[in-house]
Image: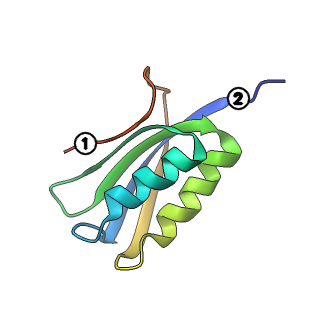
Amino acid sequence: MSETIIARRYRVHGRVQGVGFRAFVHRNAVKLGLTGWVRNVDDGSVEAHAQGPAHLISALEGLLRTGPRWGEVRHVDVSESSPLAGDGFLVKR
Protein backbone atom coordinates (compact mmCIF):
# COMPACT_ATOMS: atom_id res chain seq x y z
CA MET A 1 0.00 0.00 0.00
CA SER A 2 1.61 3.27 -1.09
CA GLU A 3 1.16 6.52 0.76
CA THR A 4 -0.05 9.66 -0.94
CA ILE A 5 2.70 12.23 -1.39
CA ILE A 6 1.81 15.79 -0.46
CA ALA A 7 3.77 19.03 -0.79
CA ARG A 8 3.71 22.12 1.39
CA ARG A 9 5.45 25.45 1.34
CA TYR A 10 6.42 27.11 4.61
CA ARG A 11 7.46 30.66 5.48
CA VAL A 12 8.97 30.85 8.96
CA HIS A 13 9.16 34.24 10.69
CA GLY A 14 11.11 35.28 13.76
CA ARG A 15 14.82 35.04 14.60
CA VAL A 16 15.46 32.39 11.96
CA GLN A 17 18.50 33.65 10.07
CA GLY A 18 22.01 33.41 11.45
CA VAL A 19 20.99 30.72 13.96
CA GLY A 20 21.49 27.55 11.89
CA PHE A 21 17.84 27.32 10.87
CA ARG A 22 18.47 26.14 7.30
CA ALA A 23 20.87 23.44 8.53
CA PHE A 24 18.29 22.42 11.15
CA VAL A 25 15.57 22.07 8.49
CA HIS A 26 17.90 20.21 6.13
CA ARG A 27 19.08 17.75 8.78
CA ASN A 28 15.55 16.94 9.93
CA ALA A 29 14.07 16.71 6.43
CA VAL A 30 16.81 14.26 5.41
CA LYS A 31 16.20 12.19 8.58
CA LEU A 32 12.51 12.05 7.68
CA GLY A 33 13.27 11.09 4.08
CA LEU A 34 11.56 14.17 2.60
CA THR A 35 12.49 15.97 -0.60
CA GLY A 36 12.50 19.70 -1.26
CA TRP A 37 14.54 22.74 -0.32
CA VAL A 38 15.06 25.52 2.23
CA ARG A 39 16.39 29.07 1.76
CA ASN A 40 16.73 32.44 3.44
CA VAL A 41 14.47 35.24 2.22
CA ASP A 42 15.51 38.89 2.00
CA ASP A 43 12.87 39.94 4.56
CA GLY A 44 14.58 37.87 7.29
CA SER A 45 12.29 34.86 7.09
CA VAL A 46 13.11 31.32 5.94
CA GLU A 47 11.15 29.59 3.19
CA ALA A 48 10.94 25.83 2.69
CA HIS A 49 9.23 23.47 0.28
CA ALA A 50 8.84 19.89 1.49
CA GLN A 51 7.16 16.85 0.03
CA GLY A 52 6.55 13.34 1.23
CA PRO A 53 3.95 11.27 3.09
CA ALA A 54 1.48 13.39 5.09
CA HIS A 55 2.56 12.09 8.51
CA LEU A 56 6.21 12.96 7.79
CA ILE A 57 5.30 16.41 6.48
CA SER A 58 3.38 16.97 9.73
CA ALA A 59 6.45 15.89 11.72
CA LEU A 60 8.61 18.42 9.86
CA GLU A 61 6.01 21.13 10.38
CA GLY A 62 6.14 20.55 14.12
CA LEU A 63 9.91 20.92 14.03
CA LEU A 64 9.64 24.13 11.98
CA ARG A 65 7.37 25.60 14.63
CA THR A 66 10.01 24.87 17.29
CA GLY A 67 13.23 25.62 15.40
CA PRO A 68 16.82 25.17 16.57
CA ARG A 69 18.01 26.08 20.04
CA TRP A 70 19.23 29.59 19.13
CA GLY A 71 16.25 30.48 16.95
CA GLU A 72 12.94 32.01 17.90
CA VAL A 73 9.98 31.09 15.72
CA ARG A 74 7.19 33.66 15.93
CA HIS A 75 4.92 32.53 13.11
CA VAL A 76 4.78 29.91 10.36
CA ASP A 77 2.74 30.44 7.18
CA VAL A 78 1.72 27.15 5.56
CA SER A 79 0.32 26.62 2.08
CA GLU A 80 -0.38 23.58 -0.05
CA SER A 81 1.94 23.22 -3.01
CA SER A 82 2.51 21.04 -6.04
CA PRO A 83 5.12 18.29 -5.85
CA LEU A 84 8.40 19.11 -7.57
CA ALA A 85 10.59 16.77 -9.59
CA GLY A 86 13.90 15.77 -8.05
CA ASP A 87 15.45 13.85 -5.22
CA GLY A 88 16.99 14.93 -1.95
CA PHE A 89 16.62 18.02 0.15
CA LEU A 90 18.66 21.10 -0.81
CA VAL A 91 19.84 24.16 1.05
CA LYS A 92 19.50 27.05 -1.41
CA ARG A 93 21.58 30.18 -1.11
Q: Position of residue 89 (x, y in %)?
A: 42, 38
Mark drawn on residue 92? 1
Residue found 77% across the figure and 24% down from its top: 2
Left or right of 74, for residue 29: right
Toward which corner of the image does residue 92 lie, by quadrant?
A: top left
Please, which residue is most extreme toward the left here?
42
Label 1 to label 2, Cα distance in Å? 26 Å
Q: Secondary structure at mark 2?
A: loop
Toward which corner of the image does residue 67 lie, by quadrant?
A: bottom left
Q: Residue 70, relative to residue 26: is it above or below?
A: below
The residue where tag 2 is placed is 4
Residue found 38% across the figure and 47% down from its top: 48
Residue found 67% across the figure and 42% down from its top: 54
Q: Secondary structure at mark 1?
A: loop
Q: Nearer the viewer, residue 39 or 77?
A: 39
Label 2 packing within 10 angstroms: few (<14), some (14-19), many (20+): few
How many numbered marks, from 0 up? Answer: 2
Q: Amino acid at mark 2?
A: Thr
State which quarter of the image contains the C terminus.
Answer: top left
Marks 1 and 2 in Cβ contact (< 8 Å): no
Toward which corner of the image does residue 61 lie, by quadrant?
A: bottom right
| Disc nearer the start of the sequence (1/2) | 2
Mark drawn on residue 37? none
Q: Position of residue 5 (x, y in %)?
A: 63, 30
Q: Position of residue 47 (x, y in %)?
A: 33, 51
Residue found 41% across the figure and 78% down from its top: 69
Q: Nearer the viewer, residue 41 or 87?
A: 87
Q: Residue 40, relative to residue 88: is it above or below?
A: below
Q: Amino acid at mark 1?
A: Lys
Left or right of 76, for residue 45: left
